[in-house]
Amino acid sequence: MDIELDVDRALFELNVLGQVSLTQAVLPNMIERKKGHVAVVSRGAGKLGIPHSRSYNGTKCAVQGYFECLRTEMSQFNIDVTVLCPGPIFSNIFLHSATGKHSEKLGRAMA
């Protein structure tokens, strides 16, 4: 495996748990009001595998799966959940996750 576990962990913290934690912070209020809309960002990478990007791809698949489930669960409270999938964008985060660079380089890419 050419990608360090720290890189995977950092990507999941940023791409998945960041959106999940923000959603969990606002969801109780939406449920109480029985109204709301959650919108998160994924990518086409969340729908199909792209070679040499398993860490990045894995985070986007996790976002897709988590928020598609949440959409079903929240429908009874009149809360919509939208997963936005913009087109391709080149970034240093993707570059370093795809090439297996060390986690300190990933940290600089996220800054």
Image: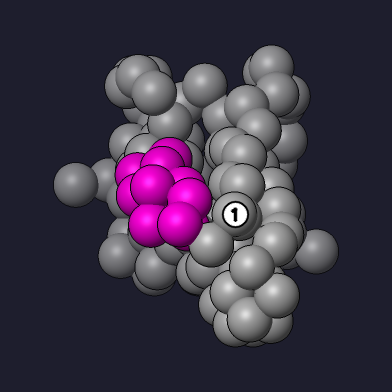
Please determine whether, in this image, residue 60 is positioned above or below residue 70.
above
Determine the residue located farthest toward the left in the rendered image: 1
Magenta segment range? 62-76
Image quadrant where residue 91 sits: top right
Q: Considering only vertical position in the picture, is 51 above or below 103? A: above
Position in image of residue 100 (x %, y %): 41, 45
Q: How is the image coloured?
A: one colour
In this image, 44 relative to 91: left or right? left
Q: In the image as oriented, which residue stretches furthest toward the right? A: 111
Q: Residue at x 67, y 18 (%)?
A: 88
Q: Name the residue under label 1.
A: 78
The answer, for residue 29, to whether it is visible in the render is yes
Prevailing secondary structure class for the magenta stretch in the rendered image? helix
SS at circle 1: loop
Depth check: give the residue in front, 37 or 47: 37
Residue under the point 39% across and 47% down: 72
Disc 1 marks a residue whose amino acid type is Asn
